[in-house]
Image: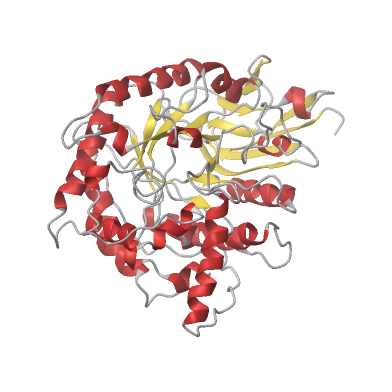
């Protein structure tokens, strides 16, 4: 997650994290006399057509656009975000979003060993009810930063800290606390499930997830569960790779394959025992993958007899951008690198994808271009996203009073919320205001294709629809209040839908 520049305590999101990561890593490597290699050119992106999709009960492919709700929950006594029902409703009515990544916390769920706080689950359910009323799909995110609030930030209850008495000194930037010996040791002990005396930690963590999944398996708003926010490798964190240099001989491959992957698999198996149908979301390790480096994690499996419902949910943040406060239009290849690596990993995992977090400070130089590049890339991969985060005055394009900044026009864009078939390509050109969707019909899918069209914002003079299917084989319905276009095509085969300005 990012944190505001100069912040010394709890992060509000993810900004300064990577800036400090870069600066501190440079210092560490300089001390060792190591010169980082230049970032390599991105590899070609494989075509996406074969791996699965997130689908609804009608079999339609879901594309998720939304936000994290929200970083304020890290600091509130009850771990609830500042957002109320009215501000959450704005996600739908003003921006057409259909997705929220909702932060929950282990220390809120299990404040004492073996004791699940039902009152906390009640508070979560109240918010889920709001999302259900508004038709928003929620992924419950088990959030952590720097392992625990006892160190600086959020995550594990204090009783789950096993730091072996290693020292901890609070740092000026929250991210630097990851380098503290006590924090690294706490992570190391958490990951040692079979090799040490701390297997109970992951068992308790799994108990917390079982409690959540048992309670919300049938909740209409719950799409699924994000197993852990930005899992950290502890002392196995590879500083060389964090600088943008691939290091297959370093510690990250071992961590991904022998610590993170088995941990995820145990959680998936436990959740499936109480919830056979919700989607399970998983992230790569914290750090380098978010900047476009590799994840070395092997393929996860879903014991669900009816087929896998696993979703890759990586984060995207540019280290160079956050370190410099500028998106370098000629030298920052993080978005292209990220696209290349994630496409390869998606083919391996055979899973759908959405970006669990991405964003940047609105004062960043070339902020518009970075946002446009990420959004276009997400469309190319045909994956959704959750912007970090829905906190007024933070990274979202709104000031502290909730008034939009101009860059909100980039986040609010035409997109296919639900596709009655298999998408093969879609995209939106914010300059020409042209949206297109290409898809193939698929047996067993019901309901129309739904496209969010921000008519009042981007088409004040009206819009026109073009459908490639033969005349008489399709029909449209326009919900002006929700700004949702429904297109039902009876003909089989490949189809193309376009929306463009009425005078375009």
Task: Report the front residue among 83 and 163.
Answer: 163
Compared to residue 424, the image places residue 262 above or below, namely: below
Q: Is residue 184 left or right of residue 395?
A: left
**Residue drawn at 85 percent across, 34 percent down:** 504
- In which quadrant of the rendered view does residue 205 lie? top left
User: Can residue 45 be seen from the camera position used here?
Assistant: no
Counting from the top left corner in percent of width and height, residue 105 is at: 35, 36
Choose between 124 and 264: the one closer to the eye: 124
Name the image colouring.
secondary structure
Point 69% across, 68% down: residue: 331
Q: Residue furthest bottom?
A: 33
Look at the image and tell me whether residue 428 can be seen: yes
Residue 254 percent location from the top left of the image: 30, 68
Q: Is residue 387 left or right of residue 164?
A: right
| Residue sitting nearer the eye, 159 or 165 | 165
Determine whether 246 is above or below 103 in the image.
below
Looking at the image, the residue that sits furthest to the left is 197
Name above or below for residue 342 compared with residue 40. above
Q: Residue furthest right?
A: 503
- Tell me: 162 left or right of 123: left
Q: Where residue 188 sits: x, y (%)?
A: 26, 60
Q: Would residue 469 be found to the left or right of residue 421 on screen?
A: right
Q: Nearer the viewer, residue 17 or 351?
A: 17
- Determine the image quadrant of residue 335: bottom right
Image coordinates for residue 492, horizontal then vertical, percent: 54, 33
- Which residue is drawn at the image coordinates 47% and 30% (left, top)? 60
* Quadrant position of residue 395: top right
Q: How many numbered discs, if any?
A: 0
């Amino acid at each position: 997650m990012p944190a505001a520049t100069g912040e010394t305590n709890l992060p509000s999101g993810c900004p300064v994290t990577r800036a400090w990561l870069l600066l501190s890593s440079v210092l560490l490597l300089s001390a060792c006399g190591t010169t980082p290699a230049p970032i390599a050119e991105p590899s070609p992106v494989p075509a996406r057509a074969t791996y699965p999709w997130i689908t609804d009960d009608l079999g339609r492919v879901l594309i998720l656009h939304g936000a994290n709700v929200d970083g304020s929950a890290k600091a509130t006594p009850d771990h609830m975000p500042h957002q109320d029902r009215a501000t959450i409703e704005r996600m739908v009515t003003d921006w057409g979003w259909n997705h929220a990544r909702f932060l929950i916390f282990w220390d809120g769920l299990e404040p004492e060993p073996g004791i699940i706080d039902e009152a906390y689950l009640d508070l979560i359910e109240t918010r889920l009810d709001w999302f259900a009323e508004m038709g928003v799909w929620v992924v419950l995110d088990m959030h952590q930063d720097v392992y625990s609030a006892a160190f600086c930030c959020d995550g594990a209850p204090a009783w789950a800290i096993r730091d072996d008495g290693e020292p901890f000194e609070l740092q000026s930037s929250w991210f630097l606390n990851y380098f503290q010996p006590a924090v690294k040791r706490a992570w190391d002990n958490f990951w040692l499930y079979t090799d040490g005396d701390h297997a109970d930690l992951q068992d308790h963590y799994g108990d917390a997830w079982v409690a959540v999944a048992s309670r919300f398996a049938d909740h209409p708003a719950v799409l699924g569960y994000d197993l852990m926010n930005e899992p950290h490798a502890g002392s196995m964190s590879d500083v060389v790779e964090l600088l943008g240099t691939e290091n297959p001989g370093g510690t990250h491959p071992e961590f991904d394959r022998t610590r993170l992957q088995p941990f995820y698999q145990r959680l998936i198996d436990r959740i499936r025992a109480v919830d056979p149908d919700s989607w399970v979301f998983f992230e790569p390790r914290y750090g380098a993958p978010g900047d476009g480096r590799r994840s070395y994690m092997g393929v996860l499996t879903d014991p669900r007899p009816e087929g896998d419902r696993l979703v890759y949910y990586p984060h995207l943040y540019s280290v160079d951008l956050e370190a410099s406060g500028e998106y370098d239009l000629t030298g920052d290849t993080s978005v292209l690198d990220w696209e290349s690596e994630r496409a390869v990993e998606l083919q391996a995992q055979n899973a759908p994808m959405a970006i669990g977090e991405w964003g940047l400070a609105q004062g960043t130089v070339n902020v518009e271009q970075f946002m446009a590049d990420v959004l276009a890339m997400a469309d190319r991969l045909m994956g959704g996203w959750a912007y970090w985060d829905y906190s007024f005055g933070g990274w979202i394009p709104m000031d502290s009073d909730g008034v939009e900044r101009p860059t909100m026009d980039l986040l609010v864009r035409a997109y296919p919320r639900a596709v009655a078939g298999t998408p093969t390509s879609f995209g939106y050109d914010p300059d020409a205001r042209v949206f297109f969707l290409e898809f193939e019909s698929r047996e067993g899918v019901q309901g129309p294709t739904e496209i969010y069209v921000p008519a009042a914002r981007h088409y004040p003079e009206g819009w026109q629809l073009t459908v490639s299917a033969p005349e008489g084989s399709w029909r449209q319905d326009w919900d002006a209040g929700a700004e949702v276009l429904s297109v039902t095509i009876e003909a089989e085969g490949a189809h193309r839908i376009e929306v463009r300005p009425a005078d375009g």
